[in-house]
Image (cartoon, rainbow, N blue to C red):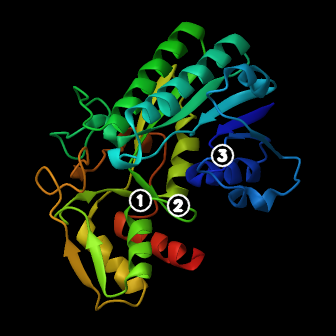
Amino acid sequence: MKAIVTGGAGFIGSHLVDRLINDGKEVRVIDNLSSGSMKHLSQWGDDPMMELMELDLLDKTSLDNALKGCDEVYHLAANPEVNAKNASPEDHFRQNIEATYNLLEAMRRSGEQRFIAFTSSSTVYGEADAIPTREDYGPLVPISLYGASKLSCEALLTAYASMYGFRAIIYRLANVVGPRSNHGVIYDFVHKLRASSGELEVLGDGSQSKSYLYVDDCISGILKGIERGNQVDIYNIGSWDRTNVLEIAETVKDEMGLAEAKIRLTGGVDGGRGWKGDVKIMQLDMEELKSVDWTPKYGSAEAVRLTARSVIEAD
């Protein structure tokens, strides 16, 4: 039996593929390659441990065949854009909610799969009053369409798991960073400084403070969470601290040898946010995942610095 990784050619997905294969699991990658890249999987070449199906989850007719012979599903395929300027409501509905529904329906028809592991997001909490935020925090009031789509997917997963007997493991991720990332604040800062080395534009007022999770820690957390075995498990995955946008800007400047570059704050919207729907403060309580013997190796500042180096080296 194989594991399926949807979005397996993407940033987080390709790291998960690497780990599963290195652990001896055969993997079938499902990816439409709209944002993923074959270069992320190039190290496997023609290795029989990996099979790639270039397939869109919106293509319902092909999913039944794609799931044959697979007992584990890791569902990472999604539109990752929180900023509404980069993704429309229809994008989030179709690529996140409808795609997840199609996958769950295929699993229902198949009956072969033991579990589905799903990468949700800290954005489902909206602007939480309790920081760090626990999994049982509520009510969940997301302030972005991205967060709303992820919360909708969570509801579908829990209902399908309860109705049709497979397990659902849901991971609410902090901001995941590391090698192969191709969007987000660190990536943007590097490319802004590449274009104009004397000045760095920072969206918002610079005080946005969030947790940053190194991708290796993310993958180890996903695999560790599967071990518990409840019908439905929900875990936060993040780092034990947070850092703000100005600190990230200074780290990127330092790594690029551009310490003298000036920072220009845009001021942002709605009290200094980078964009409409941007959560200003986010840090997750991780005691649930720690209870199954997981802890992150990297704090936010170190994760940011390592990522800045990897983005700079990849250019």
Q: Residue at x 73, y 26 (%)?
A: 71
Label 2: which secondary element: loop
Q: Name the N-terminal-most of marks 1 and 3.
A: 3
Q: Residue at x 27, y 73 (%)?
A: 201
Per the model, the C-alpha gap separating discs 3 and 2 is 13 Å
Q: Are marks 1 and 2 in contact (CB under 8 Å)?
A: yes
Mark 2: amino acid: Ser
Residue 51 can be seen, yes or no? yes
Give the side of residue 23 with respect to residue 240, left or right: right
Q: Which one is nearer the viewer's eye here, 224 or 252?
A: 252
Q: Nearer the viewer, residue 120 or 170?
A: 120
Name which residue lies at 58% across and 42% down. 223
Q: Which badge, 3 or 2, comes first in the chain's sequence?
A: 3
Left or right, residue 237 beside residue 169: left
Provide the secondary structure element on which disc 3 rests: loop
How far across and down, in percent of the image, does residue 204 sit?
Answer: 20, 61
**Amino acid type of the residue tagged 3 in the rendering:** Gly
For the point 32% across and 71% down, which residue is it?
248
Question: Which percent across, then down, holds residue 108?
Answer: 64, 13
How many neighbours does mark 2 have within 10 angstroms: few (below 14), some (14-19), or many (20 or more)?
some
Q: Quadrant of residue 149?
A: top left
The residue under label 2 is 181
Q: Quadrant of the C terminus?
A: bottom right
The percent coordinates of residue 44 (x first, y second) are 81, 57
Characterize the local packing of mark 3: few (<14), some (14-19) or many (20 or more) Cα atoms within 10 angstroms.
many
Asked whether residue 305 is in view, the answer is: no
Q: Which residue is mark 3?
A: 8
Discs 1/3, front: 1
Mark 3 touching mark 2, by CB under 8 A?
A: no
Give the residue pinned by disc 1. Answer: 184
